Amino acid sequence: MSYLLLVLGFLALVQGASMLVAGASSIARRFDISDFAIGMTVVAFGTSTPELFVTLIAALGGSPDIAVGNVIGSNI
């Protein structure tokens, strides 16, 4: 059962990423922004969002050391 959930989660992740990129490209074309600029922005948000959630969960959970360590580590 856990393997099935892993595969389904991975497929949902790939589908969600595809929809995000397609939507961002559509917005870029509508406002005459280059696909490169939108692509870099999507990559920036995509790589920063997990770190944001880890930091928020750690800070709200009473572990400020983990939150600070995550911020320092992500900026190195």
Image: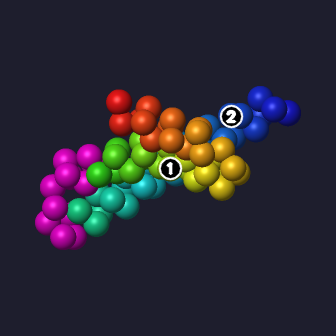
Q: Is residue 37 left or right of residue 60?
A: left
Residue drawn at 18 percent across, 70 percent down: 31
- The stretch of residues the image draws in magenta is 29-40
Query: What amino acid type should be assigned to the residue bearing mark 2?
Result: Val
Q: Is residue 31 left or right of residue 55?
A: left
Where residue 68 sits in the image (x, y, percent)?
A: 51, 41
Residue that numbered label 1 is attached to: 52
The verdict on residue 35 being magenta is yes
Residue with the most extreme right position: 1
| Contact check, label 1 and label 2, Cβ < 8 Å | no
Residue that numbered label 2 is attached to: 7
Q: Is residue 39 left or right of residue 14?
A: left
Residue 12 appears in the figure: no
Where residue 14 sits in the image (x, y, percent)?
A: 52, 42
Q: Which part of the image, by quadrant, shows the N terminus?
A: top right
Q: Nearer the viewer, residue 29 or 62?
A: 62
Residue drawn at 76 percent across, 38 percent down: 5
